[in-house]
Amino acid sequence: MKKAKPIMIQGTMSNAGKSLFCAALCRIFKQDGYRVAPFKSQNMALNSYITDEGLEMGRAQVVQAEAAGISPSVLMNPILLKPTTDVGSQVIVNGEVRGNMSAADYFAYKRKLVPDIMKAYNTLASENDIIVIEGAGSPAEINLKTEDIVNMGMAKMVDSPVLLVGDIDRGGVFAQLYGTIALLEPEERAMIKATVINKFRGDRAILEPGLDMLYNLVKIPCAGVVPYMYVDIDDEDSLSERLNAKAAKEVDIAIISLPRISNFTDFSVFSQFSGVSARYVKSVADLKSPDMIIIPGTKSTISDLKWMRQNGLEAEVLKAAARGVPVFGICGGLQILGEKISDPHGSEGGGEIAGLGLLPIETVFSEEKTRSQTDGRFENIKGVFNSLNGLYYKGYEIHMGQSTDASSVIQNGDIYGSYIHGIFDEKGIAREIVRVLYERKGLEFNEENDFDIHSYKETQYDLLAKLTRESVDMDMIYKILEEGL
């Protein structure tokens, strides 16, 4: 049976740019006529996605699948860890919850998941020409190497050559690359066929002597120096620059940056309007006087509600709502806006807590997670956003709690909530919300074209591929791919 050729992208650290580089390669290979699929054996992220089959996977592989021009599949990410505390995560295997585990328990358990990993990988490999594999963190985390299933351990399981990516933007890129390689075993070092320097700003001529010295030290060629790219592609990493507070614009949307925020990419669509700021805020001082407040999804609804209560953001949201500022909650944000949250089964540690009381619902956490895609049209919307009625929406639900009102959009005056992730993405929805916010301020809304996020994503993936082709030696990468290990 014909089997795909693998190539693996590992990084010197988290947020070195592995996910985006994998997406770039997926797009380039697609453009060059190959059937290509992404793969990451184990992902740790709070940004997740529900497939057509109702299974849960990390969003990084969704982005990479989009770049490859194929539908996302849970085969691309057989293990997803969703942190619930600083020392524990919900473990999702093949798209379904396996349970909550402490870091120590999972470390002892994870080798048992190798058959699941290999079954998923082999299925993808039988259907494609190339598999672009993403590692996690760094392969030189020497305390974790004995049970590794996501970096060199994964590369060994499928005999994949490795490209090692370093982040020059944070400084010390030569130490990153050299130190990572030096900490590997000789057979692991031999698997690294090239290095890549990522997020470069400046004159490459100044960098060249360092590249020569690095080669003399490690005898591994550099496949390219990738510039710092200004492409607008969803980033699932908690270090995403989207989460950094920005200055308010003509219309200001404040998104509460909860400690366990999930699916913050739900709101990327608002950033496409030149006069709109979509700011993530963590404190009362950051909140200022927004035109709309959004409370996003969260993996730990109860603890994040307590955080809002303790730092004063709950009181400020209540004051803003009383002044007539629209408030919209998504998933966990919807639950926070309700009257009460109960956790009888201990899904989030147990207990009961009063919500903000802005929506007439109560939420009870169950032992089973709701996972489904959904679509429809806005109906019976009242208040400031009543002009949404009739517009088509599409998204997905992923939540443990069940609320007493099961409407697609729950509302009370100008307070709105929904379990649907991606509810703002379809054509016309974000534009209508922004138009209303402009009108409320007596400002003229001058955006000429209706924003189509799907077409926009395609242009961004093509731009990513173009910039990557210009900065890396694709002949070298194809040679590495062809020769393998």
Image: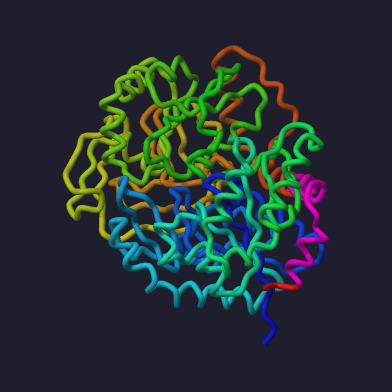
At 31% from the left and 36% from the top, the residue drawn is: 304
- Specify the quadrant that holds the N terminus: bottom right
The majority secondary structure of the magenta stretch comes to helix
Q: Is residue 165 visible?
A: yes
- Specify the quadrant that holds the C terminus: bottom right
- Relative to 247, residue 18 above or below: below
Give the percent coordinates (x, y) of residue 134: 58, 59
Q: Is residue 192 left or right of residue 99?
A: right
Which residue is at the front of the view, 265 or 38? 38
Tell me if residue 470 is in the magenta stretch: yes
Task: Read off the magenta span.
Answer: 462-482
Q: Is residue 437 left or right of residue 467?
A: left
So how many labels did they put on this image?
Answer: 0
At 48% from the left and 46% from the top, the residue drawn is: 421
At 47% from the left and 61% from the top, the residue drawn is: 42
Give the percent coordinates (x, y) of residue 328: 43, 32
Which residue is at the front of the view, 162 or 324? 162
Q: Kindly indicate the quadrant of the structure image that contains residue 251.
A: top right
Q: Is residue 52 visible?
A: no
Tell me if residue 380 is in the magenta stretch: no
From this viewpoint, which residue is outermost toward the top? 442
Give the percent coordinates (x, y) of residue 157: 54, 74
Give the percent coordinates (x, y) of residue 57: 49, 59
Q: Kindly indicate the quadrant of the structure image that contains residue 409.
A: top left
- Relative to 24, residue 301 above or below: above
From this viewpoint, which residue is outermost toward the bottom? 1
Which residue is at the front of the view, 475 or 419? 475
Q: Is residue 212 left or right of residue 162?
A: right
